[in-house]
Image: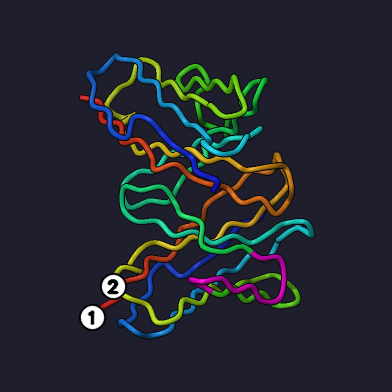
Amino acid sequence: LAKTTQPISMDSYEGQEVNITCSHNNIATNDYITWYQQFPSQGPRFIIQGYKTKVTNEVASLFIPADRKSSTLSLPRVSLSDTAVYYCLVGGNNFNKFYFGSGTKLNVKP
Amino acid sequence: GAVVSQHPSWVICKSGTSVKIECRSLDFQATTMFWYRQFPKQSLMLMATSNEGSKATYEQGVEKDKFLINHASLTLSTLTVTSAHPEDSSFYICSARNGTGNNQPQHFGDGTRLSIL
């Protein structure tokens, strides 16, 4: 069962690029890495998923080194509305279980 | 696509009442759904894995007779909190995966806030 470790919190200012790193040292060969955003009293929202190297979509980029023991979520030019908790999850098999780590509370300041 | 709906979004009831929460995948079929519980300012804690057509798999420490899970169709899983007490008050969230491939992420409902008086 892959365990993830993230910084508890991060501060940033509007317009800055934010990078949140997640450690997952015991990731399995067939595991994918998925990042979610959660606002208070809402369910987590899918941001991005990757297996290796770099993945980019309209809201974020995900960087995964060759050993896949960590990953970095990159949010370009954050705004106040990006203030939320960000979780990385590791897993993939159909009946695999997904355990949430502590997440990273991102606080974007004006 | 990949929308998961939970109902109700908020429940307030008296101690001893049983409460049913529904989780539906609206535009895809989900053979596996997951149920989580989240206390204030804490992370999500996996309670059980709901498998269509078979018994749910519960995490250690989660009472299966207390939290009844039924996954009778490929688009609906229900969680029933039986004889709820104040300590069961929490935010309950379900998720579902669209397909069985390794690259299929979970899609989450918006949660159900359960308050037991």
The total number of labels drawn is 2
Q: What's under tag 2, amino acid-wise?
A: Leu
Residue at 53% from the left image edge and 35% from the top image edge = B25
Determine the image quadrant of residue A82: bottom left
Magenta region, residue range:
A50-60
- Few, some or many residues within 10 Å of mark 1 (<14, 14–19, 20+): few
Name the element at disc 2.
helix
Residue at 38% from the left image edge and 40% from the top image edge = B111
Residue A80: mark in rendering: 2
In the rendering, at what x and y percent does residue B41 appear? 32, 52
Q: Are marks 2 and 1 on the same chain?
A: yes
Q: Tell me if B13 is positioned left or right of A103 in this view.
A: left
Q: Viewer-proximal residue, B62 or B55?
A: B55
Residue A54 is a magenta residue: yes
Name the element at disc 1.
loop
Q: Tell me if B21 is positioned left or right of A107 in this view.
A: right
The C terminus of chain B sits in image quarter: top left
Q: What's under tag 1, amino acid-wise?
A: Pro
Q: Which chain letter goes with mark 1?
A: A
